[in-house]
Amino acid sequence: ASSITAGTLAAARGGVQAFSGARVTNSATQAVGTSDDTILDWDGEQFDTDVYHDNSTNNSRMTIPSLSGSAAISYVLITVNLSWTLFADAEKYELRIFQNGASTNAYSRQIQGGNASVTGTIVVGGSSVFSCTAGDYFEVCVSTNGAGTVISASDLGSADGYFASYNIMRIG
C-alpha cells in the first residue's frame, strides 16, 4: 500500500475534488412545434466554473471541458427544470437529454394531460448521471403532439419559483 503525505487525494480515494459545473437559464419563451424535436436554447448563466457553456455560440449545449491530469471529467449529473405553458388535455409532452446530438437512454420524461377541464402550466424536471469525455456535449430536447406549446422563460424573481434552468455538475 502506498502512502500520500502531501497534496489532495483523488476523490475516488476519499479526497476532495473542486466543484465544477454550470447553471444556465433563458430570457425568452421558446415555441415547441407539433411532433418536432426542439432543442432548447439557453442565453444566461448564473455560474459556469470551467466554460461548459457559451451564451452566443451553440448556446443549447453544455460541453465537457478539457481539464488536465487527474481533473479529467468522466461523469456528470445533469438536471433540467422546465415550465410548459398551454398544457392541454390529451396532449403528450416529452423531455429528453441528448448527448453529442443523439437521444440517450439515460433520461426521458413523458407526461400527458388527462382532464378535459384542465389547461394551463405544468412544471417538469428531472436529473440523471451521464458518462462522458472531454468534448462531449449535452442538450435539452423537448417534443409534444400539442399545438402552440411553449417553454417558459426563466422567472427567478417569481414568488411561485417556477423557472427554467439547465444544470451540469461534475461528479467524477
Image (cartoon, helix red, strand yellow):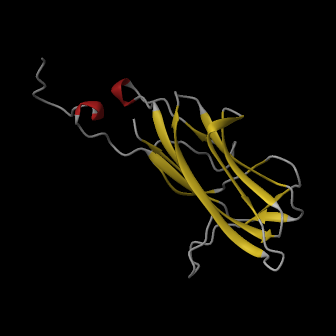
Residue 47: percent from the left, percent from the top?
49, 55
Which residue is outermost to the top?
Answer: 1
| Residue 105, image quadrant | top right
Depicted 61 relative to depicted 34: above or below: above
Q: Quadrant of the C terminus?
A: top left
Q: For the point 77% across and 66% down, which residue is it? A: 113
Residue 2: percent from the left, percent from the top?
13, 18
Q: For the point 90% across and 63% down, which residue is it? A: 147
| Residue 125, image quadrant | bottom right
Residue 161: percent from the left, percent from the top?
56, 75
Q: Quadrant of the N terminus?
A: top left
Residue 123: percent from the left, percent from the top?
65, 67
Q: Is residue 60 visible?
A: no
Query: Does residue 56 appear to the left or right of 6 in the view shown?
Result: right
Q: Is residue 140 visible?
A: yes
User: Between 49 and 145, which is closer to the camera in this rendering?
Assistant: 145
Depicted 82 relative to depicted 37: above or below: below
Q: For the point 66% across and 56% down, which residue is it? A: 43
Q: For the point 64% across and 62% down, which residue is it? A: 124
How many numbered marks does the figure carry? 0
